Amino acid sequence: MYEDQTYEKIRDRMLGSMPADIDKREGSIAFDAAAPAAIELMYLYMALDLFIQNTFGDTATRPFLIERAKERGLSPMEATPSVVRIVPTPSDVEISTGARFSCDDVNFRITGKATTGSGYLAECETAGTIGNKPNGPVVPIDYVAGLSKVEITELVTAGEDEEETEAFRKRYLASFDSMAFGGNIQDYREKVGAIAGVGGVKVYPVWNGGGTVKVVFSTSDNKPPAAEKVTEVQTAIDPVTNAGKGIGIAPIGHRVTVAGAKAKEINISFIPSFKSGTMQDYIEAIKGKLSDYFSELNTDWESTQTATTESYNDSGLVVRISQIEARLLSINGVEDIANTKINGEAGNLTLEPDELAEVGSVSEGAGTS
């Protein structure tokens, strides 16, 4: 707003307000008197400009944005550690709580036996996405009698980095669009979404009669959650043993059922034309492009459900042939693509409301007759 208030402009304005018969040339008494004051006034305008910028949520720098958001009861989400499933060999080896294991550049600490499935749950000692290890061997730091091998088999809870400034700004501005109150849809979205490892959230009110609510969620990395994570979120919202009693996040009288979003395998076939080589030479690059596209698509999963005072709508993600072809054509060496099909059909695929896209098979299709 005041960036045009430069030293020269301020100085010349000051000199211009002096009588015309005064010597104003550089080096004159008038000039030398006005110059230092003009510099200080320029700094004052700069400070004023910064103050105005930090007054508004859409332009404030991070420290001032955090202060503004406190007025809405919001603060940046802190980094959280990942939780993985660790399975020993032999499977009957007993591992004590607190035992430590190393994987690449991070360490994990056993928190207890898995309540569902096999093995043990282990929490990363370093918060953030650095601990998101879906699989791979780990090395025991502490001696475990009888252990011959141990590996990570599943990422149960994805670790999250501290919330970035622009993501926090978006959440702050969105808080003005709808009011979270007493168990309405926005209330569930905010409170469930704040649980570590939870990404998108969909809420289905009165899904099985009065007082019932269904909550479906994806992980923070936009994937279907593990069974343990579903149980954890269920317990936090409305424990099964005390359903409807208001023990968790849900208000008294709300009987909440929690479920995880489901993976939908997307099988792609097409007739390719390569500059050289065969399909097998490009298969990894193709699957990589598809994985990137589906990952981007899954970030919009929650937004396919909208609820306002005027309307309620819930639809599924749309996997588009045009997007698939555009991304595959960006691979170096792929010249052309024809007859693209998604799950056997030559058209876009609309997923069910609770489904996330996952790369399935990729094959070379047949030509049209």
Image (cartoon, grey):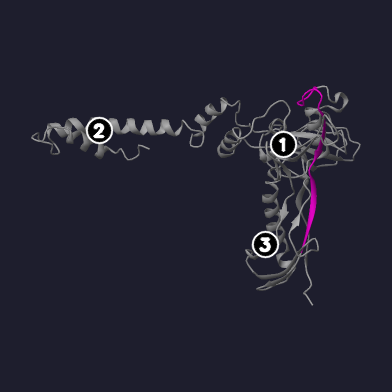
Residue farthest front in this picture: 310
Q: Residue at x 56, y 28 (%)?
A: 69
| Residue 251 magenta | yes
What residue type is disc 3 on?
Ser
Q: Give the residue at mark 1.
A: 197
Residue farthest left in this picture: 21
Q: Residue at x 67, y 50 (%)?
A: 296
Q: Position of residue 118 (x, y in %)?
A: 88, 38
What residue type is disc 2 on?
Ala
Sequence-first tag of 1 and 2: 2
| Residue 136 magenta | no
* Neighbours of disc 3 within 10 Å: few (<14), some (14-19), many (20+): few
Decide: is 336 above or below 188: below
* Neighbours of disc 1 within 10 Å: few (<14), some (14-19), many (20+): many
Sequence-first tag of 1 and 3: 1
Q: Position of residue 71 (x, y in %)?
A: 56, 25
**Label 1–label 2 contact, CB within 8 A:** no
Disc assigned to residue 38: 2
Nearest the viewer among 39 and 100 is 39
| Mark 1–mark 2 distance (CA, rounded to whole Å) | 54 Å
Q: Give the residue at mark 3.
A: 322
Nearest the viewer among 311 and 252 is 311
Q: Nearer the viewer, mark 1 or mark 2?
A: 2
Q: Which residues are magenta?
A: 246-268
Disc assigned to residue 345: none
**Secondary structure type for disc 2:** helix
* Neighbours of disc 2 within 10 Å: few (<14), some (14-19), many (20+): many
| Mark 1–mark 3 distance (CA, rounded to whole Å) | 32 Å
What residue type is disc 1 on?
Gly
